[in-house]
Image (tube, rainbow, N blue to C red):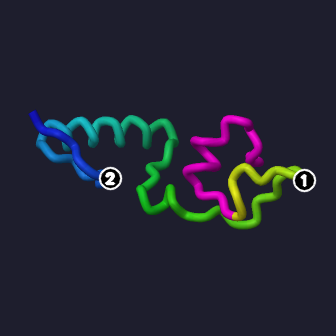
Amino acid sequence: MSTLDGYDTQPYTIQQVEFEQQVIQFLTSENYTQLSYAKVNEVVMNLKFPEGVTIFGTQVTVEYAMFHDVLDLCPE
């Protein structure tokens, strides 16, 4: 059995390649966009938060804006 180790997004086995291709094809057909690890770590510029909101610090990455914003502070 293969074990994924680290943060790379490349598949390790033929079965993973085939599965990934099916998932990408389906999600693309549903108008989803694939984010790379590098894109998720990009800083989102010019976000305006309500006064006093400092939970994210001075910079917000795509990852934090999309996946960690449990208080729904980031604008759409």
Residue density around tag 2, few if under 14, some if 14–19, many if 20 or more, within 10 Å: few
Q: CA distance from mark 1 to mark 2?
A: 35 Å
Residue density around tag 1, few if under 14, some if 14–19, many if 20 or more, within 10 Å: few
Q: Residue 26 in the image: x percent, y percent?
A: 38, 35
Q: Secondary structure at mark 2?
A: loop
The single residue placed furthest to the left in the displayed view is 1
Q: Residue 27 in the image: x percent, y percent?
A: 43, 38
Considering the image in quadrants, where does the N terminus appear?
top left
What amino acid is found at the position of numbered circle 1 in the picture?
Glu
Left or right, 71 with reference to 30:
right
**Residue 14 or residue 3, whichever sits in front:** 3
Q: What's the magenta region?
A: 59-76
**Residue 59 or residue 33, whichever sits in front:** 59
Q: In the rendered structure, find residue 51 and report the number of the disc placed on it.
A: 1
The residue under the point 12% across, 43% down is: 13
In this rendering, is residue 4 above or below 8? above
The residue under the point 72% across, 49% down is: 55
Left or right, 70 with reference to 23:
right
Q: Which residue is mark 2?
A: 7
Q: Residue 5 in the image: x percent, y percent?
A: 23, 47
The single residue placed furthest to the right in the displayed view is 51
The residue under the point 51% across, 60% down is: 41
**Residue 53 or residue 10, whichever sits in front:** 53
The residue under the point 44% across, 49% down is: 34
Q: Residue 76 in the image: x percent, y percent?
A: 74, 46
**Upstream in sequence: badge 1 or badge 2:** 2
What amino acid is found at the position of numbered circle 2 in the picture?
Tyr
